[in-house]
Amino acid sequence: MVERYERQVVMPEVGAAGQARLGRSRVLVVGAGGLGSAVLLYLAAAGVGVLGIADDDTVALSNLNRQILYVTDDLGQSKAHTAARRVKALNPDISTMPYAHRVLRGNGPALVRQYDLVVESADDLETKRLVNALCVEAGIPLVWASVTRFEGQMGVYTPGNACRACLFPVLPEPGTYPSAAALGIVGAAAGVMGSLEAVEALKVLLEAGAVLTNRLLLWDGLRTSFDLVSFERHADCPACGGWCGGTAKRRMGTGGGPE
């Protein structure tokens, strides 16, 4: 046990107390695709005690350029259950809770409230919007990200701060925005953003460093650049509006990217 975590326990931000805290933590990862693969592997490796894995999809051949949790022999298998087996193989000390169904308005509230933190790694805007709303309603921190092609974006919601819907208040009608298949994605780009999600999740759990609240991280892999955009909770936000005034300093359209 000590040897497994020695590289992070030696750090002052973690230590023995922080490692024990991670072991008591419960994190729900919504989406076990490109982003979720990196998130789940790194949170499992870090020793997060319970990992919930929500994904209703099965493994397809087109997933394998970026969804590094899976191998060719997994084709046709449930992503949630396959991911649970793979991260348990990496770290038998943790517990996994696979949910091979879609997170919906009906089942989402009870599911989210079982966890200390949610990491949203979904590939559609409807799920991203719903998970944000569920976390706001439950007062549970949320790490969210999206990635397409060679670029990605990420933010963190913590209770009392701006949420994802403050940036992206309008949900496009289904079918009016490009699909993941149409946009394309470099597999390593999903790894970059998923790894960053894992880092932010660990910071939230450990209460370490400056968490990415009220800021949007924009990564451009073609330019090898990171940009931060500050924003505030919006009085008209459909998820958290009415708590306080304020106007986003820069609006980013409808929000987006799959994966």
Image (spheres, rainbow, N blue to C red):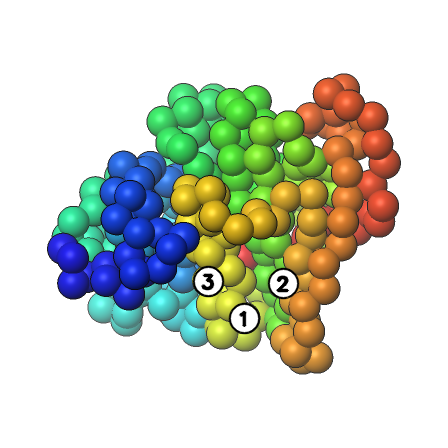
**Does any portion of residue 133 appear in the rendered image?**
yes
Mark 3 touching mark 2, by CB under 8 A?
Answer: no
Q: Position of residue 61 (x, y in %)?
A: 38, 69
The residue under the point 31% across, 40% down is 21
The mark nearer the N terminus, 3 or 1, is 1
Q: Position of residue 196 (x, y in %)?
A: 51, 60
The residue under the point 43% across, 73% down is 65
Q: Residue furthest front?
A: 12
The residue under the point 30% across, 61% down is 10
Mark 2: few/some/many CA within 10 Å (<14, 14-19, 20+) = many
Location of mark 1 (residue): 189
Q: CA distance from mark 2 to mark 1?
A: 8 Å
The mark nearer the N terminus, 2 or 1, is 2
- In the shown orientation, is residue 68 left or right of residue 92? right
**Does any portion of residue 236 appear in the rendered image?**
no
**Quadrant where the N terminus is found in the figure:** bottom left
Report the amino acid beneath label 1. Ala
Mark 3 touching mark 1, by CB under 8 A?
Answer: no
Location of mark 3 (residue): 195
- In the shown orientation, is residue 41 left or right of residue 149? left
Q: Is 52 above or below relative to 223?
A: above
Q: Element at badge 3?
A: helix
Q: CA distance from mark 3 to mark 2?
A: 12 Å
Mark 3: few/some/many CA within 10 Å (<14, 14-19, 20+) = many
Report the amino acid beneath label 3. Ser
Report the amino acid beneath label 2. Gly
Location of mark 2 (residue): 152
Q: Element at badge 1?
A: helix
- In the shown orientation, is residue 127 left or right of residue 175? left
Mark 1: few/some/many CA within 10 Å (<14, 14-19, 20+) = many
Q: Element at badge 2?
A: strand
Q: Position of residue 36 (x, y in %)?
A: 42, 55
